[in-house]
Image (spheres, rainbow, N blue to C red):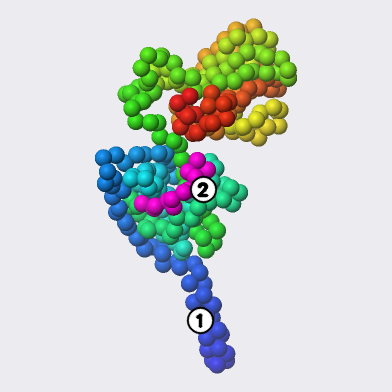
Amino acid sequence: MERKKQLILLGLIPVVAVGWYLFRPELLFVNQSVSEKLPVSQSANAVKELSKGSFTSYAHETKGSAILVEADGKTYLRLSEFSTSNGPDVRVYLVKGSDASQAGVNKAGFLDLGVIKGNIGDQNYEIPAGTNLSEYGGVNIWCKRFSVSFAGATLTPTKPVGQLSTNGWSLAGFSDITVTKGAIKAGNQNLGTVAIVETSGKRFLNLSNLKAIRPKTRVFLVMAETLLDAKTLKSSAKVNAGGIGSGAKSGKFAISSDLDLWLYRSIALVDASGKPYAFAQLRSAQEKAGNATILDFLTA
């Protein structure tokens, strides 16, 4: 009997060793801190912030910001005021598209920037030269060994220096800045126009030249490229901008400046029964001309 116990124990040793190697449970209790300074520009040009986002926790609680910066022609991903759990083979991914979740990584693809330098602290990762940054709109902290996302951050383009005032956007000589606009259509019928504008640092959804507006209509700003039916409206993220009455000729709705307007691309008019009856696509002037960039979009 004693001999049998010894054999069982001997057989468990490699199993435990392999399990320990794979899971590395001790890493959950050991923090690795790093403190790297912001990349320094050796030329007269200042370090430029390109985009930024805050981390959302998934498998493990994660805090801090992901920032894309440019210095002397090189681009870096900087993790600032960052903290997450330690773990085996945790890597930093630059994610294609704007979905920085695990689903986004699996669906859209990513650029592997390497093993995380530390689970706590500020750190920089150089992005390979030639990378098309317009394709990458997110960052993910990823455990490669188990294909699990610790956290993700969606990157929002930084407003250009020189066009900011204490109230937000400002351009000399202009009171309003049109960000995007489009025609409101019900089938082939044109029911008016819609535009998102910036005024003194505040953002509004403006409807004008309206006709055939149904009673108790609600206006929704929708996260969809092309919105043409009730099914797409139901499945898409959306913001209820407000109500507008029958026979209205115009409408103005304040919207949050935190909304990423590169994602909210359409509006829908919904009647009292909950049925959408008119739609509009929001596009900047540069997009309509076929030569848009994200920066153009923000300053259209």
Q: Give the x, y percent position of residue 266.
A: 60, 26
Q: Is residue 157 above or below residue 117?
A: above
Give neighbour class at mark 2: few <14, some 14-19, many 20+ (Cα, 10 Å). Answer: many
Q: Which residues are magenta?
A: 124-135
Give neighbour class at mark 1: few <14, some 14-19, many 20+ (Cα, 10 Å). Answer: few
- What residue do we see at 30% from left, 53% from top? 36
Label 1 – label 2 distance at C-alpha? 40 Å
- Note whether residue 207 is visible: yes
- What residue do we see at 46% from left, 63% from top? 89
Q: Are marks 1 and 2 in contact (CB under 8 Å)?
A: no
Left or right: residue 30 compared with residue 106: left
Q: Residue furthest right?
A: 187
Q: Is residue 281 magenta?
A: no
- How many marks do you count on the picture? 2
In the rendered image, which residue does mark 2 sit on?
95
Q: Secondary structure at mark 1?
A: helix
Q: Give the x, y percent position of residue 150.
A: 48, 53
Amino acid on which disc 2 is placed: Val
Q: Nearer the viewer, mark 1 or mark 2?
A: 2
Q: Give the x, y percent position of residue 270.
A: 66, 20
Query: Is residue 78 or residue 249 the one in the foreground?
Result: 78
In the rendered image, which residue does mark 1 sit on?
13
Occupied quadrant, residue 287: top right
Q: Is residue 158 above or below residue 268?
A: below
- What residue do we see at 49% from left, 67% from top? 23
